[in-house]
Image (cartoon, helix red, strand yellow):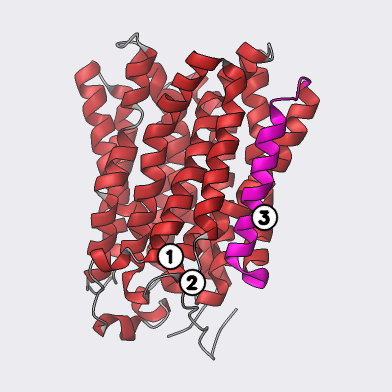
Amino acid sequence: MNGYSRSKIWLLGLGFFSISITWALYNAYVPLFLEDFIKKAGLIGFMMTIDNYFAMFLQPWIGRKSDRTRSRFGKRMPFLLIGMPLAAVFGSLIPWHNGIVTLIAFMVLMNLAMSLYRSPTVALMPDLTPGAKRTQANGIINFMGGVGSILAFAGGAYLYERHSSLPFLTSSVITLLCLAALVYVIREQRDSINYERTQHEKLTSFKGEWNRPTVFLLGAIFFWFFSYQGVEALFTLYGTNRLGMTDGQASFSLAFFSLAFVAAAIPSGMLGNRFGKKNIILIGVVGLICVFSLISFAESTLLLRIMLLIGGIFWACININSYPFIVQLGEESSIGTRTGIYYIASSIAAILSPPLMGTMIDWLGYSVLFYVAAGGMAVALLFLLGVRDQGKSVQAPRSQSM
């Protein structure tokens, strides 16, 4: 076994890079296709949550299945070898729909294919990385994902103006190229930490994964994603209706949050490794409570964007450290399973948050958006404080290559 290699983590980030490009383009342009057949925004919004339902029900099963898989390609790679080409094919077909039935069929098939490999792709990171390096590694792959999203938004509009199929065709080609690079570089049986040991470990029961620290952490994950997803989904409406921005000004303002997150991704992982994941997450949660509470008082565009910039840094403190934290609370043999239950919490939040926060806006006005988001973060803080046991930290092998 060659041991931990930072270069392999950067290359593993290609998987996250391709996922982020695909989702960014899907979320940007599929609503436009749906609008040709569906005029109610609420129904379009429901159709756009298909991936979250698959994440909630299918990805935990896929993650656990990958923990039990034994093949000459490893535990996770077989799911990438099947799912990524299928996602590339069905994703490229979406713009070529000839009616609402074929459009929905291609959407469902693409989402199913993505669900086959998303959890195994994410689980590869802790497989290849000792416990002491996982927050840094998560920062790297999230940085790659953020770069993918930025490139998708920057290049997608240019390609879409030339033909609606070009963004989807490009993302499909990128997905296949990333898969080829991963297959060429990563050999799970050679590169995974303690691969031989986990081959023979007894897999903890699914019920056994829900220990007290995990349940409290999942509660925190649910509520901070509840706040984040609601703000992300409704911010442009907030900017246009409460602050009088144009659509472009509002969406550009939200980009400050995303850019700050990408810039802070790797440093947040390094801080989590040095000072502890829980401590850095606490800083992020308290920071976002303050930012969300104060944003409602921001009347100028400049002040709003500065606060969003600060908020993106605090969100990186939370998001980069949360996945390695939940993996740390379990056994090495159940990484895929714990990846799946992480997605249960975040997916339920993504499904519930926009309609519930939208209803609050209907009742009380747009000024309530960030107060509700701050409240969600406050509840997340209470759950996080209940996580007493920070779990086992897997020690890095003595022989490491950097």
Residue 256 is tagged as none
The residue located at (68%, 27%) in the rendering is 253
The one of 81 and 340 positioned closer to us in this rendering: 340
Of labels 1 and 3, earlier in sequence is 1
Give how far across and how far down residue 59 sits, in percent.
Answer: 29, 51
Q: Secondary structure at mark 2?
A: loop
Residue ID for mark 3: 283
Residue ID for mark 2: 389
The amino acid at mark 3 is: Ile
Q: Height in image: 239 above or below 136?
A: above
The residue located at (30%, 45%) in the rendering is 56
Around disc 1, counting alpha carbons within 10 Å, would you say few (fewer than 14), some (14 to 19), or many (20 or more)? many
Query: Horizontally, is 61 left or right of 241 in the view?
Result: left
Query: Horizontally, is 371 left or right of 387 in the view?
Result: right
Q: Height in image: 50 above or below 160?
A: below
The kind of secondary structure the magenta stretch mainly shows is helix
As for residue 278 lying within the magenta part, the answer is: yes
Quarter of the view holding residue 275: bottom right
Give the CA distance from mark 1 to mark 2.
6 Å
Around disc 3, counting alpha carbons within 10 Å, would you say few (fewer than 14), some (14 to 19), or many (20 or more)? some
Which residues fall within the magenta stretch?
273-300
The residue located at (56%, 51%) in the rendering is 381
Residue ID for mark 1: 213
The amino acid at mark 1 is: Pro
